[in-house]
């Protein structure tokens, strides 16, 4: 039975774990909050990343960003302390610069690294319907494929780092879709249209919006699948990459500004809360809502 260590059991990590457990893999879990790993209810829970990695053949990491990854891989009791020829599948959204930083450290242990970023919300991962953007050597991607295909469709997108780059494109597109849809949902309602009809036509153009129906149509703050704070982090990473390549990205910059405006009240909420930028609530002031009127 293939042995896999999973580092990070947040919303995405726990979804990965449940899907892989259902496929029959032998799992060892680690999370900096041990109770969260225990709560998943499958596999053995390790005390440190090094403990989790020691007997694994593959190591999957799903963490919040570069800082968490550095602590997990390179800190005391870190994953690389016990690495010895494993294949590391880095599934976080940390950007290509971190992948370039990590790759030689992993290589020095005789191990290999694939950046295998995930496109799809946790429920999609649990149904095995995500898209996996794999950057790395072809032989390493093929070695990982029997595991990754349990999570969704695997696309080899080129050399190391390209999975991380393409994930930033994906999340920038998602931000633009949600920000644009939030504006148009409110504009349609203001014009007297039924909220359900407005959302129906928006979702015809952008089917990914369907998972945010409660926020857009019913004005509910739904359970968080992708927090606004994490989307802002990804947009910061994306704009850093785009600007470094002198690639103009005005739409991404506007989306980032709108996400930033929503962070004050809705940082921990799902990205569907973007629609609240345009809708009054009892404690709103008109000046707090988005407007296209010139500011004094």
Image (cartoon, helix red, strand yellow):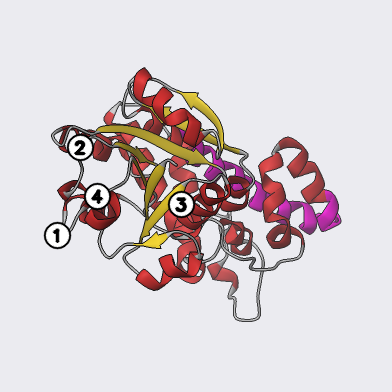
The mark nearer the N terminus, 3 or 1, is 1
Q: Along the line of sight, which residue is nearer the eye, 51 or 207?
A: 51
How far apart are the two marked residues, 3 and 1, measured between alpha carbons? 29 Å
**Residue placed under numbered mark 3 in the picture:** 231
How far apart are the two marked residues, 4 and 1, measured between alpha carbons? 15 Å
Determine the image quadrant of residue 93. top left
Q: Along the line of sight, which residue is nearer the eye, 63 or 283?
A: 63
Q: Is residue 183 left or right of residue 237?
A: right
Residue 175 belongs to the span the image colors magenta: yes
Categorize mark 3 by other alpha carbons within 10 Å: few (<14), some (14-19), many (20+): many
How far apart are the two marked residues, 2 and 4, measured between alpha carbons? 14 Å
Which residue is at 43% across, 43% downward? Answer: 253
What is the chief secondary structure element of the magenta stretch? helix
| Any part of residue 15 in sight | yes
How far apart are the two marked residues, 4 and 3, measured between alpha carbons? 33 Å
Which residue is at 78% across, 52% downward? Answer: 188
Q: Percent position (x, y) of residue 261? A: 47, 60
Asked whether the residues under the numbered discs 2 and 4 touch, taking CB atoms below 8 Å apart as contact, a structural biologist would say no
Q: Is residue 7 left or right of residue 293?
A: left
The mark nearer the N terminus, 2 or 4, is 4
**Residue placed under numbered mark 1 in the picture:** 76
Determine the image quadrant of residue 222. bottom right
Q: Percent position (x, y) of residue 212? A: 67, 55
Asked whether the residues under the numbered discs 4 and 1 touch, taking CB atoms below 8 Å apart as contact, a structural biologist would say no
Q: Secondary structure at mark 1?
A: loop
The magenta stretch spans which residues? 169-197
């Amino acid at each position: 039975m293939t042995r896999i260590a999973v580092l990070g059991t947040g919303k995405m990590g726990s979804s990965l774990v449940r899907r892989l457990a259902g496929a029959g893999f032998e799992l060892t879990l680690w999370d900096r909050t041990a109770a969260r790993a225990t709560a998943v209810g499958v596999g053995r829970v390790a005390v440190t990343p090094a403990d989790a990695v020691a007997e694994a053949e593959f190591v999957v990491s799903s963490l919040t960003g570069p800082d968490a990854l550095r602590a997990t891989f390179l800190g005391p009791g870190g994953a690389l302390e016990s690495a010895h020829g494993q294949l590391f599948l880095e599934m976080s959204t940390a950007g290509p610069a971190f992948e370039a930083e990590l790759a030689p450290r992993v290589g020095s242990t005789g191990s290999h690294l694939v950046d295998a970023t995930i496109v799809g919300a946790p429920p999609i991962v649990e149904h095995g319907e995500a898209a996996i953007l794999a950057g790395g050597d072809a032989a390493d991607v093929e070695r990982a494929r029997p595991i990754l295909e349990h999570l969704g469709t695997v696309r080899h997108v080129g050399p190391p780092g390209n999975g991380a780059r393409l994930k930033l494109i994906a999340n920038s597109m998602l931000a633009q879709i949600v920000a644009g849809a939030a504006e148009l949902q409110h504009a349609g309602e203001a014009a007297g249209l039924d909220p359900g009809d407005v959302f129906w036509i928006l979702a015809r153009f952008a089917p990914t919006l369907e998972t945010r129906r409660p926020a857009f149509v019913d004005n509910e703050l739904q359970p968080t699948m992708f927090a606004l704070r994490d989307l802002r982090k990804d947009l910061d990473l994306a704009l850093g990459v785009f600007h470094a390549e002198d690639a103009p990205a005005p739409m991404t910059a506007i989306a980032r500004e709108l996400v930033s405006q929503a962070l004050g009240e809705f940082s921990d909420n799902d990205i569907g809360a973007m629609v609240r930028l345009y809708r009054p609530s009892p404690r709103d002031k008109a000046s707090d809502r988005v407007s296209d009127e010139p500011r004094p």
